[in-house]
């Protein structure tokens, strides 16, 4: 493993960690209670439903980001980018 591969893998893992940490903190701060600023614009039920949708969508993003990371790491380690490079040349 050379230094460039190490840097790329570290960057991918760092991005994965930061992305999921920000999603986790977003989920932690969600509330189904309608803020006073939105009174008259949204009904409390509609706001709660949108927050529930956001929560489910964010939880699903954990799986998609993990799958994306796994896929890109497999392509790197199995030589997928090298095959594409050789094919293009």
Image (cartoon, grey):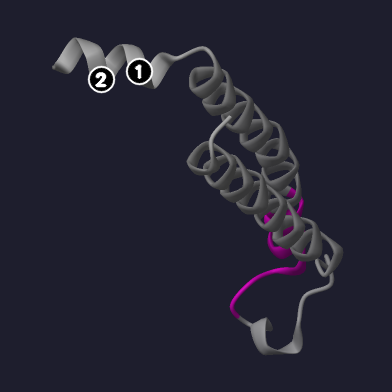
Quarter of the image holding residue 65?
A: top right
Give the numbered dot on residue 82. Answer: 1
Which residue: 73% across, 58% down?
51
Left or right for 84, reference 25: left
In this view of the protein, which residue sits in the foreground, 43 or 74?
Answer: 74
What secondary structure predominates along the stretch shown in magenta?
helix
Quarter of the image holding residue 66?
A: top right
Which residue: 25% across, 20% down?
85
The N terminus lies in quadrant: top right
Which residue: 69% across, 83% down?
39
Give the numbered dot on residue 85. Answer: 2
Local SS, label 2: helix
Q: Position of residue 20 (x, y in %)?
A: 72, 51
Q: Contact (CB < 8 A) between labels 2 and 1?
A: yes
Seen in the picture, residue 66 relative to 79 is either above or below; the reply is below
The C terminus lies in quadrant: top left
Q: Residue furthest front?
A: 2
Q: Position of residue 16 (x, y in %)?
A: 65, 47
Q: Residue furthest bottom?
A: 37
Say few, some or many: other residues with alpha carbon within 10 Å of mark 2 (under 14 / 14 to 19 / 20 or more). Answer: few
Say few, some or many: other residues with alpha carbon within 10 Å of mark 1 (under 14 / 14 to 19 / 20 or more). Answer: few
Give the numbered dot on residue 32. Answer: none
In this view of the protein, which residue sits in the foreground, 18 or 39?
Answer: 18
Numbered range of the magenta stretch: 41-52
In this view of the protein, which residue sits in the foreground, 51 or 58?
Answer: 58
In this view of the protein, which residue sits in the foreground, 88 or 40?
Answer: 88
């Amino acid at each position: 493993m050379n230094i460039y591969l190490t840097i790329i893998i570290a960057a991918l893992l760092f991005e994965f960690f930061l992305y999921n940490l920000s999603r986790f903190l977003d989920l932690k701060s969600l509330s189904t209670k309608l803020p006073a600023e939105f009174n008259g614009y949204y009904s409390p039920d509609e706001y709660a439903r949108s927050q529930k949708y956001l929560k489910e969508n964010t939880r699903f993003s954990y799986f998609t980001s993990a799958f994306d990371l796994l896929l890109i790491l497999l392509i790197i380690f199995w030589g997928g980018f090298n095959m594409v490079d050789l094919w293009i040349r």
